[in-house]
Every structure is written in C-alpha cells, then in structure tokens.
Amino acid sequence: MGIISRFKDIMAANFNALLDKAEDPEKMIDQYLRNLENDMANVKVETASIMADEKAAKRKVEECESEITKMAEYAKKAVVAGNDDEARQFLSKKAEVSEKLTVLQQSYTLACENSIKMKEMHDKLDADIAELRSRRDLLKAKVKVAQTQEKINKMSSGYASAGDNLASFDQMEAKVNKMLDQADAMAELNKSEKTDNIDQLTSKYDETGKSSEVDDELAALKSQLGM
C-alpha cells in the first residue's frame, strides 16, 4: 500500500500555504494542477486494482463459506445413511475449510480497508482538482492584481523621488528669477543716473544762457541812459 503513503500529502494538502511560498504563484497554480491530474491518473489505476482485489477476496470468502455449508450437508446425509466414517471425513474437510475461511476473512477485511482508503483518496483528489480548476482563473486574476499593485507602488516611490527633484528645480528657478530681477533693477538705476547727469548738464548751460541775456539787457539799458 505504498500508494497510500505516497499521496498522504494530497489528502492533507494546504493549497493556500503552498501558494504563499511560491515565487511565481501563476506558474505554481498550473504546475500544481498538472501534478494533481497526473496523480489522479495513477490513483484511478491503483484504486481500480485494489477494488478488484476486494471483490476477489470477497468471492473467495463466499466460495469457502459455500464449501463449508456443502460439507456440513454431506456429513448430515452420511449420518442419515448410517455411514459414520464418511460423515467424519466430511466433517474433517469442513474443519479444514473453516480454518481457511478465517485467513480469507482477514484478507478480505484488509482488502476492504484498503479499498475504502483508496476511494477516499480518489474522491479527495478529484475534489481538489475540481476546486482548483474552478479557482484557477480567480487565483490568476488575483495574482495579476497583486503584480499590478506592486508595479504601481514602485512607480509611486519613483514619483516621490521625481517630486524632490522638481522641488529643487523650483528653488533654482526662484534664484534665477531673483538674479534677473536684480539685474533689471540695476539697469533701471543706471538708466536713471544717466538721465540725471544729462539734466544737470543741460541746466548748467541753460543757466549760462540766462546770465548772458541779463548782461546784454543791462548793457542796452546803460547805453540808453548815456552811461
């Protein structure tokens, strides 16, 4: 019964625990299903063989019981016929077959137990395969969602780093803008200073012109007065 010990892990399989440990859950699902299907084929063959052994053992028990009944009947007939020696022979054969029956019954009991175990295994494996087939698409979908979420998390982490770079760029841009504003202000001040110089220079010559006109007018006035 090595087949039973070989499939004990299937009887107690915890699929979710296996899935958690898998590096590639999607491939693991397909591989686990293929393994179960291969095991199922082996279990079916072994189960059919053990069930056949059970039927053969049962048939031998029934044949032995029939032989015992027949020897008992012959012993009765021999007694009725007054043939005690022949009756003893039938009863001796009956005792021999009865001992054989004890061995056959033990073999049949063991065959029944093995058959029950194999049927349980067969039904468990069949149920596991049916469940996995029905859950396969759902499990794969969950795996895809988890993988997508992981990618989004990585992208979000990368975006946070990019945000830091953008903040640094904003600071640099502010500095550049400040430098430009300062340069514009300096240029405006320089322009204003030049304008003031021109105004002062113009005023100088304007005042010189006014002084000359006064002097001319004074000389004309003196001339009229004969001075």
Image (cartoon, rainbow, N blue to C red):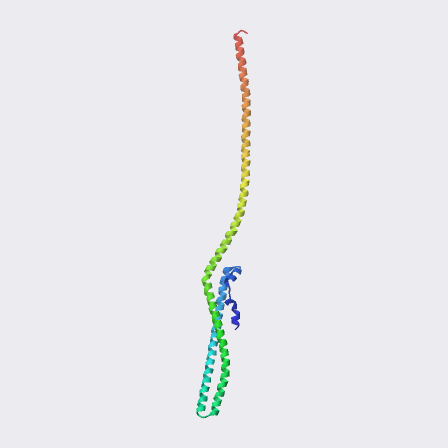
Q: Is residue 49 visible?
A: no
Residue 215: image location, x then y, percent: 54, 13
What residue is drawn where x is 54% and y is 23%? Answer: 199
Of residue 165 and residue 59, the one placed in the foreground of this image is 59
Residue 42: image location, x then y, percent: 49, 70
Residue 201: image location, x then y, percent: 55, 22
Residue 194, compared with residue 130, is above or below; it is above
Residue 222, compared with residue 192, is above or below; it is above
Of residue 22 and residue 213, the one placed in the foreground of this image is 22
Residue 36: image location, x then y, percent: 49, 66
Of residue 11 and residue 222, the one placed in the foreground of this image is 11
In the picture, the quarter occupied by the C terminus is top right
What residue is drawn where x is 46% and y is 66%? Answer: 127
What residue is drawn where x is 49% and y is 53%? Answer: 149
Q: Quadrant of residue 178?
A: top right
Residue 176, compared with residue 143, is above or below; it is above
Q: Is residue 68 visible?
A: yes
What residue is drawn where x is 54% and y is 15%? Answer: 212
Q: Quadrant of residue 209?
A: top right
